[in-house]
Image: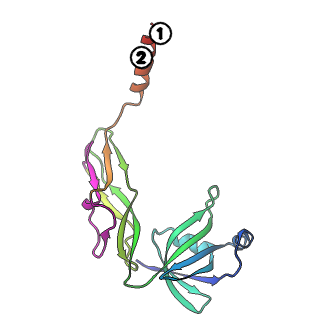
């Protein structure tokens, strides 16, 4: 996984007014925490951060005030519900070689067995433990030829070297649901109503 370098500034102003001023300058307020250290309040460049966050669990190399460099991964991202712009980000401090628990997006590939069955993502992301600088971007799972009733459990997913499950191996990640006729229940209900009226 590549590192994304972002220049950050420490901030001393807090509250809604200060946050609004930061966002007006196309920047994002954030907090860096972890390793038992005091939370560090930061101002981050909005566009660079937005691009970085397109990669799940991106490893960010923070250049703080041009003095210190820290590695971090995003832990919580708040976006405007309507416009989608970043409102706030919480970053977790990590060290090289350290293991962290993160959620990796699960990507299904292949065609289900014929019959119009549906693939349900019970877990869109799989909780795993991985070395902070080697977090996989996604996990690909083949669903080729699976029929209704089939399911893929966490333990069935092949993980890269150095990555281990952080969830029960029997947890269902994907399952195939039988195709259902949409009109049948409504028609049966109507017939039932007519029978009740007679």
Q: Which residue is mark 2?
A: 192
Q: Residues within 10 Å of mark 2 (few under 14, many from 20)?
A: few
Q: Earlier in the sequence, mark 2 or mark 1?
A: 2
Q: Quadrant of the N terminus?
A: bottom left
Tell me the element at label 1.
helix
> Residue 159 appears at what percent x and percent y?
28, 68
Q: Nearer the viewer, residue 195 or 38?
A: 38
What range of the chain is rendered magenta? 145-169
Q: Residue at x 27, y 50 (%)?
A: 151
Figure check: 137 above or below 106: below
Q: Position of residue 11 (x, y in %)?
A: 67, 81
| Residue 76 on image: x %, y % | 53, 67
Magenta stretch secondary structure, dominant: loop
Question: Would you identify the image quadrant in which residue 45 lies?
Answer: bottom right
Name which quarter of the figure residue 84 lies in.
Answer: bottom right
Rounded to the nearest whole Å, what is the CA distance between mark 2 and mark 1? 9 Å
Residue where numbered disc 1 is placed: 197
């Amino acid at each position: 996984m590549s590192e994304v370098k972002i220049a950050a500034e420490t901030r001393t102003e807090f509250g809604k007014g200060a946050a609004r001023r930061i966002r007006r300058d196309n920047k994002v307020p954030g907090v860096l925490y972890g390793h038992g250290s005091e939370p560090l309040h930061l101002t981050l460049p909005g566009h660079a951060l937005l691009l970085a966050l397109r990669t799940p669990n991106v490893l960010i190399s923070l250049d703080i005030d041009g003095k210190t460099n820290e590695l971090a991964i995003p832990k919580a991202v708040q976006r405007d519900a309507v416009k989608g712009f970043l409102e706030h980000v919480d970053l977790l401090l990590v060290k090289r070689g350290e293991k962290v628990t993160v959620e990796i997006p699960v990507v299904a590939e292949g065609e289900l067995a014929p019959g119009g069955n549906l693939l349900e993502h019970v877990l869109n992301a799989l909780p795993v433990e991985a070395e902070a600088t080697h977090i996989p971007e996604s996990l690909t799972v083949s669903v080729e030829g699976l029929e209704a009733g089939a399911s893929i459990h966490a333990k069935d997913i092949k993980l890269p070297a150095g990555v281990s499950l952080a969830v029960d191996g029997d947890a269902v990640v994907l399952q195939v649901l039988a195709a259902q006729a949409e009109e049948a229940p409504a028609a049966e209900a109507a017939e039932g109503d007519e029978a009740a009226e007679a």
